[in-house]
Amino acid sequence: MGNFFGKEWTGAPFELFGTAHLIALALVALANVALLYVRDHAGATARRNIRYGLAILLIINEFAWHLWNWTTGQWTVQTMLPLHLCSVLVWLSAYMLITKNRTIYEFAYLLGIAGALQALLTPDAGIYGFPHFRFFQVILSHGAIVTAALYMTIVEGFRPTWASVRRVLVGSYLYALHIWVINDLIGSNYLYLARKPETASLLDVLPPWPGCIPIILALALAFILLFYLPFAIKDKRTGPKHA
């Protein structure tokens, strides 16, 4: 058990798209496919329990992540403040699930799914392979962000609008500007605006910093539009939504 939570890991290192990683991705995909069954068969009480359970999972998993970093001497303001996109969305998604907040839903769906999927495909697990705590934590955290947004879409019937696209785009750019200032003040790298992450990620295919920054901002717009596309197609056929 000490090795499971320990900073020093003697087990197999994390292997990108190795067997454990692929099984984890398959389980996340299966959980989201199961939302179709929930939509068609779950009653109001069951739906509420699923929402609350998913919110509790997000919160407990995030607390455990902070506790692990604290007890292993790795917690610093430069790395552990909830300022990365997915770190923010853990807390916002939990609040969204409990309150059914539609504004937070817009960010969780249009921006959060793309960010969490990138983290699922290239997890920042370091050396910690299956079955270390960090392996489970990173998959659960980002998988639950995706599931939370899809749950509100598939089961609760939430959806973004063109107004949502504008709000999320402006809000995300303003947030990035504030994080840029914070990074400069405390020497951090939140949102990876100061440099690329040290571990493998999809950002590795982009030009060196800072040339990658405009591309990252452009990609944010592209993903927002991509996730809105199914609703834009539907609106073209049935009439637009303006909420």
Image (cartoon, grey):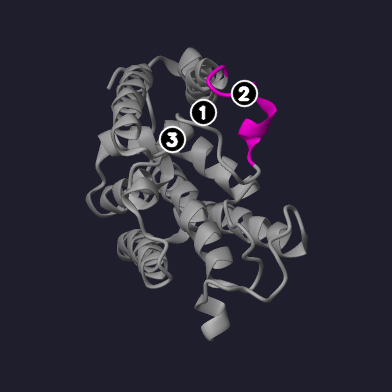
Q: Is residue 43 magenta?
A: no
Q: Residue at x 33, y 62 (%)?
A: 59
Q: Name the chief secondary structure element in magenta.
A: loop
Residue type, mark 1 in image: Phe
Q: Is residue 46 visible?
A: no
Query: Compared with residue 31, is residue 132 higher up or lower down, i.e. above or below?
Result: below
Q: Which residue matches tag 3?
A: 191
Q: Which residue matches tag 1?
A: 227
Say which label, 3 or 1, has the lower sequence index: 3
Q: Nearer the viewer, mark 2 or mark 1?
A: 2
Report helix, strand or loop for mark 2.
Answer: loop
| Residue 214 at x, y percent in the picture | 51, 15
Residue type, mark 3 in image: Leu
Q: Compare residues 110 and 216 and report the one nearer the observer.
A: 216
Q: Nearer the viewer, mark 3 or mark 2?
A: 2
Q: Residues within 10 Å of mark 1 (few under 14, many from 20)?
A: some
Numbered circle sitting on residue 208: 2
Which range of residues does the magenta coloring cover?
Answer: 201-211
Q: Quadrant of residue 109?
A: top left
Query: Compared with residue 87, is residue 12 higher up or lower down, i.e. above or below?
Result: below
Q: In the figure, is residue 114 to the left or right of 15?
A: left
Say which label, 2 or 1, has the lower sequence index: 2
Q: Quadrant of residue 71?
A: bottom left
